Image (tube, rainbow, N blue to C red):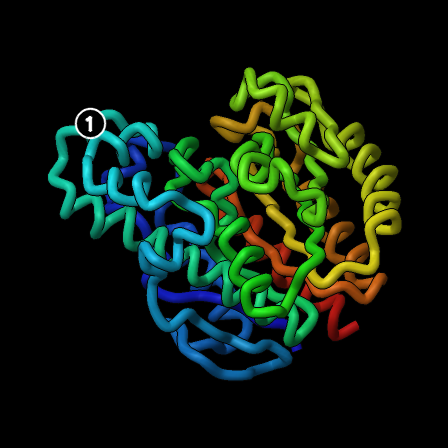
Amino acid sequence: MPSLIYSPHFAMGFPGLRFLHPFDSYRARRAYHELAKLYGLPRDGGSMDVDGLSLRGPEGPVSDPQLQLVHSAEYLQTLRRSWVVAMAIEVWPFAFTPNAFLRWCLVTPMRWAVAGTLLTAREALRTGLAFSLTGGFHHAKPNRGEGFCLFNDIAYAIMALRQEGLAQRVLYIDLDAHQGNGVCAVFLHDPSVKLFDIYNGDTYPFDEEWARQRLDVSCPLECGSDGPLYLGILERELPIFLDCHSPADLVIYNAGNDVVCGDRLGGLNLSPDDVLRRDTLVVSQVRQRGLPLAFLPSGGYTRDSYLLITRTVQAALAAEKG
């Protein structure tokens, strides 16, 4: 029975944030409410099994001592300075905002998201397939945040599972429009984590060739690349990657839908149907090989980003029932 991970605490920001940054800080809530209507789930989340779906939520946010599995204590201390948060989130007026307000609307929700990602990974190991409605902060590095990412939830989940003896060999598939440089930074000298990344090579992060060189499969695309080109590369490269590096204990899929046409930051040109085919392909290829899969939504900067997530979850659950 696949798992869905959600908490009301995943909601970030405040209603006016959309005028300062294109990310929909209420995306997790919107996606959950759509799924709640489809599957008869309680409006505010919880823990229950219904209609072939296991609903779960983290018990609380992660703490600084827990985050030190990935991030330095010095960096975590700097998040008490508003200008540090503002630089990472790329909303410069936040530099002059009281830090208590930023902790409430951004930092603490991201701590909940990190806990959600770890729970998603654990549920994937338990059930075979788990979806989080938040997470995928793949730009955060051990000593700094950037690209709207304060904490690297992906790396944290991997390190925590290793510490618990639950997963040692992990495959990471990143199909967000932006290259996952933070994940590369954490695992720069750790070849046991295999990295697959298709990304817009003409956009942020621009000049970190070291990060691209760390990838086991690196597929940079030109700005404006369309669905047929993208899906053709994925259909060719992903099965090879999975077969070369299986067996594995866990697959983490960073499924940013900022690849869709009209996204303000992605720069690629996939249709919504292309995004659904992409996600369906990844889920089916991983599940055909009997590997547990943890899904993270990552980037997406359109009004309909939450609907793209909903469509993917719905299609994957239907296929699992199959």
Figure check: 268 above or below 82: above
Residue at x 59%, y 76% (from the top left corner): 53
Residue at x 19%, y 29% (from the top left corner): 95
Q: Secondary structure at mark 1?
A: helix
Q: Is residue 109 visible?
A: yes
Figure check: 221 above or below 68: above
Q: Position of residue 221 (x, y in %)?
A: 70, 22
Q: Position of residue 91 (x, y in %)?
A: 28, 29
Residue at x 56%, y 32% (from the top left corner): 181
Is 262 or 174 nearer to us in this picture?
174
Quarter location, residue 274 = top right
Is 295 or 208 nearer to us in this picture?
208
Quarter location, residue 188 = top right
Is 96 or 273 nearer to us in this picture?
96
Is 69 or 318 nearer to us in this picture?
69
Figure check: 248 above or below 262: below
Q: Is residue 276 visible?
A: no
Q: Which residue is mark 1?
A: 93
Q: Residues within 10 Å of mark 1 (few under 14, many from 20)?
A: few
Residue at x 87%, y 47% (from the top left corner): 244
Q: Position of residue 62 (x, y in %)?
A: 36, 60
